Image (tube, rainbow, N blue to C red):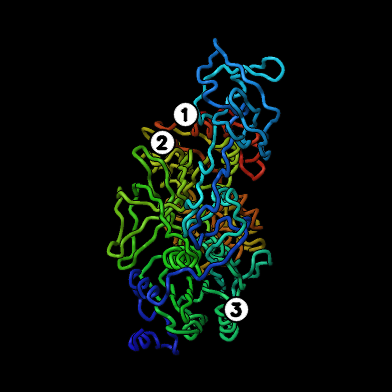
Amino acid sequence: MSQSEKRAGSASGGQEQFLTVLSREEATRRFRAHLSMRPVGDEAVSLAESLGRVLSQTLRAPIDVPPFDRSLVDGFALRGADVATASDSAPLRLALNAETIACGTAPRLEVAAGTATPIATGGPLPRGADAVCMIEQTDPDGPGHILVRRGLAPGQNIGFAGGDLAQGETLLRRGGRIGSREIGMLAACGLAVVPVYRRPRVAIVSTGDELVQPGDPLRPAAIYDSNAPIIGAAVRENGGEAVFLGAIPDDETALEASLKEALASCDMVILSGGTSKSAGDLTYRVVSRLGRPGVVAHGVALKPGKPLCLAVADGKPVVILPGFPTSAMFTFHDFVAPVLRAMSGVAARRDASVAAVTPVRILSDLGRTEFVMVALTQGDHGLNAFALAKGSGSISAFAQADGFLTIDALADHLAEGARVDVTLFDPELKVPDLAIMGSHCVGLEIVLDALAEAGISARTVAIGSLGGLAAAKRGECDIAPIHLMDPETQVYNKPYIGAGLTLVEGWRRMQGLVYPPGDARFEGRSAQEAIAAALADPNCHMVNRNQGAGTRIMIDRLIGAARPLGYWNQPKSHNAVAAAVAQGRADWGVAIEPVARAYGLGFLPIGEEHYDFAIPQSRRDAPAVRAFVEALARDDVAAGLRAIGFVPAREGSTACA
């Protein structure tokens, strides 16, 4: 790295952050230029321990398999010439030899002309025999004789020595991964020890004072360390051995000591966090002095993943992944996984992909290669790819996404209707039976649980009532949950159901104002009085909802043209609203009663809203859609909805209108 690059970020207290934001290709080139990209070594393991390992040598069969000629059936070993003309109408008589050959029994007697020896499947063929007649094709004929009713040619029903594997034949080639079938081949050849590449030891270090390990109590302003388990699993998936060193606080001396210890005992070090522009980040400075050449890239033109830091310390890779889970995993798979696979001898990953269409426009930052996680649904004309816009801090997006698409650094968007290749997280993709897009509600999980028991899978994409309604009209989903009140008729949902859609009633849920218990501005008042009091107090903060949500439409109707503090704080769920109030970041908001109860908040009812389902008429007869509608009418589903505070639609109203 040049001196001009080193000086580029040394302003502001000497902090060296984002020295040069490199392209993805240049960062990769610089990183790999200082690495051998070869396996770190090999070792011998027992056959039982070899599952999933990668062979470091080509193995050849040391023996024939099978090691002797053997019978493939239960029957009689004989000479084919003796029974060449045998048939049901003209059976031939043979004398039985005085031995029976079982598996593991060495023959003692030769099969002479006109004789036969009883033999079991897998038994070694006796001298003189060149065929085996199935027992079903013979009949007893007095003491010590049989009648053979089927003609046989030499070699019939015999497995010859080396017929499966011949001595010297290649069993497995170097670089092959060992699975259960490969273990069977090795065992058949008597190999008890297997030469494999050593798994690179990868030290995983989390950094940050805010981290708490899973299982420990979560203190205020802290988060659980989810990155370390994810990274550890990804390391194992790509041939490495994960070595967890725990979470290191933001202390430069402690961090440097831990990293030096990690480098001494491991082949690679991965840190999570400590790459963003903040005064508390120390990892860059520590990593830069661990060994030569040090940091080779700090800042890559990626989204997510810009703050990635790549370093090499005396031949060993040291990577500082961004702290947010999505950023961490994309940069891991793009930069770390190929290096780790080379170090472990695992073949380069071949990602599976499918063609899909983007139903809506996806914006991107010009100048940065962007990875966008998407959920796939089956549309009328193929697969649709919906962007999961949860941000790089989302961990749930990985569970909901089927894969990702890539937007080139030279593009600022993907157009609506663009045909794209989606790289799959799981090559064995199964598109869910149901695509549900619209407003999300915890009550929906009760219905989906019932469907799951029947083997019906569902994909839910929370895009708000209006977004779901639009998707249903375009034929991009099977079911769109909505709760929209028409301001003119004061009727829920039905006025929004146009041509091509049908409405299925779901349940009723109480919306209301949520507030900290005991707040005098709200306690003991009606919702309308409380909102008036909140609007009259210039220091009273609200938390709103996102545009397109049915709750947002209700809020705008209640407050009119007023724009109180917090109006532009627009989270996308009832839970986020309740959390903002419970944590003191807002004084009031609007959410459903079960959520208010879960967060211990005060609740002032505003009105009962209808949570119903818009269904494209072209999908109403699909088996999974019918199963969904039938589940709404089940007694156990209704009981589950009541248990969490919802009121199922009146009896009979769940039928398609």
User: In the image as oriented, which residue stretches furthest toward the top?
Assistant: 89
Image spot of residue 345 (x, y percent): 47, 64
**Labelled pair 1, 2 in contact (Cβ < 8 Å):** yes
- Give me the C-alpha separation between circle 3 and circle 2: 55 Å
| Residue 456 in which image quadrant | top right
Q: Amino acid at mark 1?
A: Ala
**Labelled pair 3, 2 in contact (Cβ < 8 Å):** no
Residue at label 2? 497
In the rendered image of this protein, does residue 39 appear above or below residue 631? Answer: below
Q: Residues within 10 Å of mark 3 (few under 14, many from 20)?
A: some
Residue 314 is left or right of residue 143, and the answer is left
- Tell me, for residue 249, which label it has, or none: 3
Element carrying mark 1: loop
In the rendered image of this protein, does residue 191 appear above or below residue 264? Answer: above
What residue sits 41% from the left and 47% below the top? Answer: 467
Image spot of residue 166 (x, y percent): 50, 47
What residue sits 38% from the left and 81% below the top? Answer: 19
Residue 565 shows in this picture: no
